[in-house]
Amino acid sequence: MSSVLLFSFVIGYFLLLLGVAWRTSRHSNNDSFYIGNRNSNWMLVAFGMVGTSLSGVTFVSVPGTVGDFSGAGYKAFGYFQVVIGYWIGYFVIAFILLPLYYRLHLTSIYNYLKSRFGAVAYRTGSLFFIISRTVGATARLYLVINVLQIFILKDLGVPFALTSFVILLMILLYTFEGGVKTIVYTDTLQTTFMLLGLVVCIIYILQHMGLSFGAAWHALDEKGFTGLFNTDLNSKGFFLKQIVGGMFITIAMTGLDQEMMQKNISVRNLKDSQKNVLSFSVVMVAVNFLFLLLGGLLYLFVLHNGASYQGHELLLGGKNVIGDDLFPTLALHFLPKAVSIIFVIGLISALFPSADGALTALTSSFCIDLLDLRNREGMTEAQKRRVRLTVHTSFAVVFLICIMIFKWIDNKSIIGVILDLAGYTYGPLLGLFAFGIFTRRALPDRWTITAICLLAPTASGLISHYAGTWFGGFQIGIELLLINGILTYLGLHAISKKPLPTN
């Protein structure tokens, strides 16, 4: 299909986002940017969060895990083990973390650490969020930009660096003023297009192969694509590891993440925010299942059309269609033009939510937590706005640098990379918040807190690297996050002291 035609849909979609941004950012101020004036509709937030949580990684990577036998830890529907853990984690967020955030009237959730432990813990938590979200968001963004580059813009002679720059400029333009107030609406729009792309592709494959849902499931079962629970204790994909790891990934990457919680605490009250999280969790489980189903159907399609395994590759017409290459290769080279257009719209709808919210949340965290911009005396609102816009632009530059680093690394399974990185970067946040919530002990307001939060990921990495040797072939998977959090918790306990008695 013509690259020019496909690219025209990308431009048209961006112009639509600019229109929404212009409409929603009128009369906005700094509070609109940070928390949407605490006036967001919970149903819009819940629906928009689907796109933010799933992003381009789910859209491209999850379908590929169904038939990816390259040792990534997932086979068939095995990734759904993690999704079950996600679902459990949302209940922890709704009934433990959200009441805490609303009771303290937080704009930045890391202010909890300040009220509980002091300025050092507060800034340490903010710093780890900035590192975590920057790495995670740019990894997601890289995946989708790389797909657009390989399948569309490369034919037009556009270099990867220019593609990345232009897309980040687009995101910068429509988040520049409105922030959260704008993103609540743009994410809703983008989630709609992403899910539309998913459903249309499933329907097309079923109709093209003349299969009902029941017949398709039977065919998937015959090919071994419906297996769910991995019972190999030593495997990274062992079901208990995946469920427990998924639960703590949700708690850390959503409940302790300023980007995700920034949208939740922009809802009017705690009850509506809880409804948002719980309804979102159900939709998230259903959508992940549909992406896995799509992956199985796509593998049936390629095998039906003569694809064959050669080592770790599955080739169809000389093109590899396994892992992250499966969905984009089929959609843009082997399926009708209408499906290609829908895929591109769905893909860019998955692209923008993975970056716009992150860019806004990082700006908010840096301005509020590190610069204390909201409480700066002697600065006018206009001066604060200029600082905020400078920080916002600076993070866009950081994003561009990180994307180029991921291009240099060029990993074929980004979803595995993101979950691995999350284990290292979110572990200290998990330990800090758990220590604050489940103990009444005090911490010294000194750099030792930061040191422990740096040492815990290092020790976790060593344990993960040597686990096979030390524990008889046992492999550490996404439970690395929990190990990291426990080590942080124990380290904090070692330097803590009993609180002074209150009169």
Image: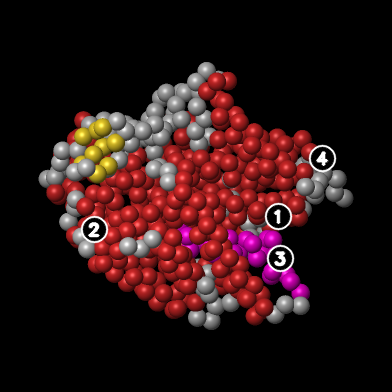
- Quarter of the image for the N terminus: give it: bottom left
Q: Nearer the viewer, mark 1 or mark 2?
A: 2
Q: Nearer the viewer, mark 4 or mark 1?
A: 1
Estimate how packed mark 3 is, as few (under 14), some (14 to 19) or many (20 or more) residues with alpha carbons within 10 Å: few
Q: Which mark is residue 497?
A: 4
Vertical comparison of 338 with 237: above or below? below
Evaluate whether residue 324 shows in this view.
yes
Look at 40% across and 52% down and name the residue there. Answer: 143
Look at mark 2 in the image and give the residue it sits on: 340
Tag 2 secondary structure = helix
> Quarter of the image holding residue 460?
top right
Q: Check disc 4 and give the amino acid type.
A: Lys
* Magenta span: 351-377
Comparing 247 with 409, the one in front is: 409
Q: Position of residue 396 (x, y in %)?
A: 53, 64
**Which comes before the other along the chain, label 2 or label 4?**
2
Look at 36% across and 73% down and name the residue there. Answer: 16
Q: Check disc 3 and give the amino acid type.
A: Asp
Look at mark 1 in the image and give the residue it sits on: 123
